[in-house]
Image (tube, rainbow, N blue to C red):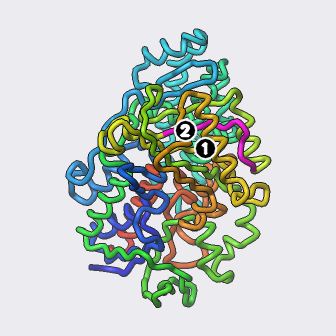
Amino acid sequence: MKGNVIIIGAGFGGLSCAIRLASQGVRVTILERQERVGGKLQQIEQDGYHFDRGPSTITMPASFRSVFDHAGVEMEDYVQLYELEPRTRNIFPDGTVVDLSGNRGWMKEQIAVYSPEDAARYDAFMDESAALYAEANRHFLGKLLLSPTDKYNFRMLRSLLRVRPTVKLDKLLRSYFQHPHTLAMFGRYATYVGSSPYQAPSIFAMMGHVEAEEGVYGVKGGTYQLIEAMTRLAQEKEVQIVTGIEVRQIVVRHGKVAGVDTDQGFREADQVVANGDVLSVNRLLLAPEYRKQMSDQRIRKYEPSISGFVTLAGVRRQYDSLLHHTVFFPERYEPEFDHIFRDRKMPADPTIYICYSGYSEAGMAPAGASNLFILVNAPYLSDSWHWDEQIDRYGELVLEKLAERGITGLKQSDVLIRYTPQHIERDTLAHQGSIYGISSNTVKQTFMRPGNKSKDVQGLWYVGGTTHPGGGTPIVTLSGQLVGAQLASEIVM
């Protein structure tokens, strides 16, 4: 095998990068500080309840399939996905229920119940959503932007103008819809990349097309089975995976990567790929003289993305109102994002998302019981909110809000586990506990994210949500493949 690449982190980005490299005959070692692979996605099993702690909504299945395709194997031999229809149930305080679907006719029927005007504009919105996705896929998502000419050329400029980067998502939605329910339902797409619909660019309206036309999927056995499948494939390709090992420093000699120092000694490498938060990697693993393009001052200028407050509840009852994915919206949507990004505090009346995989698959909970992953958007860590003081109080508030919406009995759960942004930062070194790296609340942080190739250190690469193309599980997986393909071409050539 050729080369000697170390990948720091065994999340979706690191595993997909390793598989692409190893499939081209490159020697790869993955070093993971946690005891299990998966990064932010971990599997919890307790008292017969199975939970995925981390990403639960699987979209853009082609980004996962391509990992297996480029390795010359069939994805179905490793993991099984199943399409969800309806995709997501949206429940509003006035009792309105809208089940997102790929069936345009049914979508219009549901929306027309509360807003005939919005229903009449649904087709036009979906056509624009498709156009935005086509533009992003053609010029942005599918390639690395390594040089100035990759970023600043006529085609890229023309594409950028077509997606109207200065138009906020909420403003675009208001050009089609009027009713608060519709605006909240589609504005929520900004949270898929940890951002606010009132600040993020309109490009994220493309998720309407992505979900409706490409589908939303569950994973047989839980989302973590995707990680297990990729791990198995990586090992078949002779990738060495070491868990429970902490990288303490990326070693640089004469401006070039030499390897990494770990709590178990030095490991030599001629290329290092960091699958983690770019800001944390630079701040924690590189000496200041080797990160002039990512100094502490520059790091402070980046706004982190949303984090999350998670409750895992295993309860001996079932709920007719829940689908695989269900969202309970508050009376007003906008104040939530003022709380999170302006005040950096938890919202008093939060949007509450529940993933109930047991709805789709028996065996995820005991008979007659439910395994609920409950997520509330949270601010990144700051001095404005202290989880040590607030975790129990806010956890009770979430359960009380759900009880008001008919999801009762959670305080008597067999299993009740809570995770805060502090846990996310501790386990994954995510910068200030953010889930998606930096936010996409500005044009720059959306379209000009930190690059995949270090400008300061030769042989250092980045994959993950902080770097190009962006946050979200399928995009992070794509990031790993893009870097893996580029690096393999340089090593094997």
Badge 1 or badge 2: first in the primary sequence:
2
Q: Amino acid at mark 2?
A: Tyr
Q: Name the image quarter holding the N terminus.
A: bottom left
Callout 1–callout 2 Cβ contact below 8 Å? yes
Q: Is residue 35 left or right of residue 410?
A: left
Instruction: Write the residue at 60% across / 47% down.
Output: 194
Q: Residues within 10 Å of mark 2 (few under 14, many from 20)?
A: many
Above or below 268: residue 195: above
Q: Is residue 410 left or right of residue 474?
A: right
Q: Name the image quarter holding the C terminus.
A: bottom left
Q: Is residue 325 visible?
A: yes
Cα distance in 3D space between marks 1 and 2: 7 Å
Label 1 residue SS: strand
**Range drawn in magenta:** 345-354
Corner quadrant of residue 71 = bottom left
**Measured from the top left, where is residue 236 in percent x and y?**
23, 68
**Measured from the top left, where is residue 483 in percent x and y?**
43, 64
**Measured from the top left, where is residue 215 in percent x and y?**
38, 34
- Frontmost residue, 300 versus 52: 52
Residue under circle 2? 353
Instruction: Write the residue at 37% across / 61% down.
Output: 16
Label 2 residue SS: strand
Q: Is residue 398 magenta?
A: no
Q: Amino acid at mark 1?
A: Val
Residue under circle 1? 376
**Measured from the top left, where is residue 311 in percent x and y?**
55, 48
Q: Residues within 10 Å of mark 1 (few under 14, many from 20)?
A: some
